[in-house]
Image (cartoon, rainbow, N blue to C red):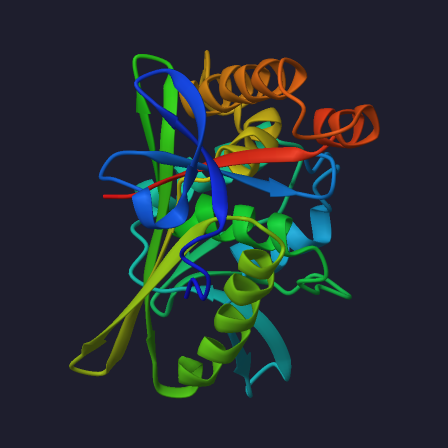
């Protein structure tokens, strides 16, 4: 909630950067949001990816062994996932059974790297929206039921931690007959750009127009500030190395 509507903000509107009062913010104006950090650039941790792929776990009392479980997976879908994982260098043995698709739990499988954990979820339960080679968003959706209802806390913490770190994604939880459906929508260019390096081995992605747009807007903002007396050279240099995003008022 904005407490001071007389504070100034920088916006982009009709391709022009300008400074306005917050209370003057109009529909479709884009507010510059700046994180005092460089854009995320990490190597996705394989174990964290697998913790997302095998997020749902079960225990087989007959063989006294814990395993990962993919409910409502057809054999054809299993084969596609197997190939996709292999394409990004993750070789695991998926098995189609009466219980669904199962595979052995990886030792020390932890969601320590949240961006990689979410990427793993996207491989198993995600829909990648790619139009004419342009990655628009990724929607992750699956059901939680029975013993897996407690998993919601892990998902909530993951989403909230990333949001606090300046990664813009949304979640939606809808009740179902036996639990609820959990949905995460990722439209943040920073996360999409990070994931693309790995996902390109599965499907061709030529560009992320949101990423290109944000970079162009950042250049415009820097140009605007250089020709004004609003900030000193030190702050301009800091901004040049910071992460800049645009929030649109609808």
Quadrant where the C terminus sits is top left
Which residue corresponds to the image point at 61% horizontal and 76% vertical from the top-left? 66
Left or right: where 9 falls relative to 138: right
Which residue corresponds to the image point at 71% horizontal and 63% vertical from the top-left? 109
Left or right: where 129 falls relative to 159: left
Which residue corresponds to the image point at 65% horizontal and 29% vertical from the top-left? 230
Residue 2 or residue 42, whichever sits in front: 2
Give the quadrant of residue 145.
bottom left
Give the quadrant of residue 35.
top right
Count of numbered badges drawn on the protein: 0
Residue 191: give x, y in percent of width and height: 55, 39
Residue 27 or residue 123, whichever sits in front: 27
Residue 221: give x, y in percent of width and height: 56, 22
Residue 108 or residue 21, whichever sits in front: 21
Given the current orientation, which residue lies at the most extreme right position? Answer: 234
Residue 150: give x, y in percent of width and height: 46, 85
Residue 159 or residue 227, whichever sits in front: 227
Q: Is residue 175 above or below residue 41?
A: below
Which residue corresponds to the image point at 63% horizontal and 56% vertical from the top-left? 114
Residue 159: give x, y in percent of width and height: 51, 62
Q: Is residue 102 above or below residue 153?
A: above
Q: Is residue 115 above or below residue 31?
A: below
Left or right: where 184 falls relative to 84: left
Quadrant where the N terminus sits is bottom left
């Amino acid at each position: 909630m904005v407490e001071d509507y007389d504070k100034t903000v920088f916006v982009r509107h009709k391709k022009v950067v300008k400074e306005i009062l917050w209370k003057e913010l109009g529909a479709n104006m884009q507010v510059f949001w700046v994180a005092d950090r460089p854009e995320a650039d990490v190597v996705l941790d394989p174990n964290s990816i697998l913790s997302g792929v095998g997020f749902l776990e079960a225990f087989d009392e007959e063989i006294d062994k814990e395993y990962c479980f993919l409910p409502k997976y057809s054999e054809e879908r299993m084969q596609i996932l197997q190939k996709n994982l292999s394409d990004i260098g993750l070789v695991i043995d998926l098995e189609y059974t009466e219980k669904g698709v199962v595979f052995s739990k990886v030792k020390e499988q932890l969601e320590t790297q949240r961006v990689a954990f979410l990427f793993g979820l996207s491989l198993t339960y995600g829909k990648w929206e790619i139009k004419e080679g342009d990655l628009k968003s990724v929607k992750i959706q699956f059901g939680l039921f029975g013993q897996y209802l407690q998993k919601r806390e892990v998902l909530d913490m993951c989403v909230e931690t990333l949001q606090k770190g300046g990664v813009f994604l949304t979640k939606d939880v809808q009740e179902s007959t036996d639990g609820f459906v959990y949905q995460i929508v990722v439209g943040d260019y920073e996360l999409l750009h990070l994931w693309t390096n790995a996902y390109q081995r599965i499907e061709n992605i030529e560009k992320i127009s949101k990423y290109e747009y944000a970079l162009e807007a950042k250049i415009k903002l820097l140009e605007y500030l250089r020709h004004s007396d609003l900030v000193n050279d030190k702050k301009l240099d800091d901004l040049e190395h910071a992460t800049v995003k645009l929030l649109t008022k609808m």
